[in-house]
Amino acid sequence: MIWDRFRIDGRAAVVTGAGRGIGAAAAVALAQAGADVVIASRTEEQLRKVAAEIEAAGRRALVVPSDLAEPDAAAELAGRAAGEFGRIDIVVNNMGGAMPAAFMDTEPRHLEKAFRFNVATAHALTRAAVPHLLEAGGGSVVNISSAVGRIAGRGYLAYGSAKAALAHYTRLAAFDLAPRVRVNAIAVGSVATSALDVVMTDDGLRTDMERRTPLRRVGDPEDVAAAVLYLASPASAYVTGSLLRVDGGIETPNLDLGLEDL
């Protein structure tokens, strides 16, 4: 049955930024498809709630409060995952982000921080996990990029540049790690997470964003979680180095930050 190709029974996954939003939804989706899941973020209370959902799906959860911006955190996370579950098969690099800002308000240090937070952390965990992925017979790495890594809009200089770098990192890493480890990314559009609370609670802003989106709605974390499951599972066994768009069809940013000409 084709559905069987989406099952990941007996496999072990590591998901970063898993305390809420896309990371939490991806972790629960992987558990519902059969995987044990290591969930990491900086807030233990949030992780405990996600762990309860994983366990409700009949799978094991390992909660690892961690700041992956710290130099040794990625290796420690990979080591704990392998130690707890005996293997690593799937890595979801969901941690990332950067605040929007006008061009002249974006200092070089903001770019450096964005690249470190979105790209260097993903590489650190992937690199630490690769020996375990190979030992398990191969595996899948899924990086969460962004639509603004592909399209241009005002105010997204640091964030968009970093996410574009993550997308190309995905292509390069896919070549480096083929054929035993697949590496893919998802270019995520506007999704109803805490980052969009201001928009989702303002009828005018939300309606304008929906109007600017071809599918006429804001995404749900489970829209992205479904794509994560596809790329993590045998359903995508012939896919690597790809950037999967989950963005409602946008070709320009659907959130206008209202930045004026210089």
Image: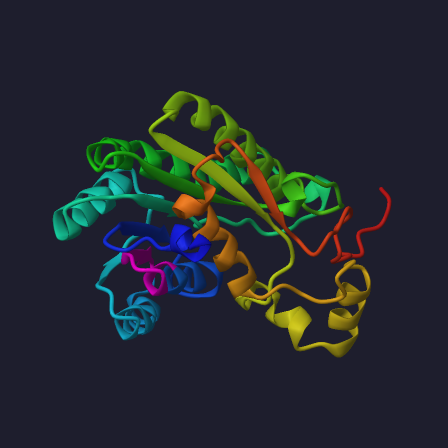
* Above or below 213: residue 179: above
Seen from the viewer's position, the closer of residues 141 and 152 is 141
The C terminus - image quarter: top right
**Count of marks overlaid on the render:** 0
Which colour style is shown?
A: rainbow
Determine which quarter of the picture holds residue 107. top right
Q: Is residue 247 above or below residue 148?
A: below
**Drawn side of residue 147 relative to residue 63, left or right:** right
Percent position (x, y) of residue 250?
75, 51
Judge whether residue 219 can be spotted in this image. Answer: yes
Residue 37 on the magenta span: yes
Residue visible at 79% across and 58% down in the picture: 214
x then y, percent, for residue 45: 30, 71
Q: Residue at x 51, y 31 (%)?
A: 241
Residue 106 visible at all? no
Residue interval drawn in magenta: 30-42
Question: In the rendered view, would you say 49 is above or below 244?
Answer: below
Q: Nearer the viewer, residue 121 or 187?
A: 187
Would you identify the image quadrant in which residue 138 lies? top left
- The residue drawn where x is 43% and y is 57% is 3
Image quadrant holding the N terminus, namely: bottom left
User: In terms of image quadrants, where is residue 123?
Assistant: top left
Identified at 36% across, 60% down, the residue is: 33
* Location of residue 6 in the rendering, given as x and y in whole percent from the top left corner: 41, 53
Q: Is residue 247 magenta?
A: no
Residue lying at the far top of the rendered structure: 176
Image side of residue 28 versus residue 243, left or right: left
**Where is residue 88 shown, x and y percent of the image?**
24, 44
Q: Is residue 146 left or right of residue 11?
A: right
- Describe residue 186's horizontal placement relative to residue 35 as left or right: right
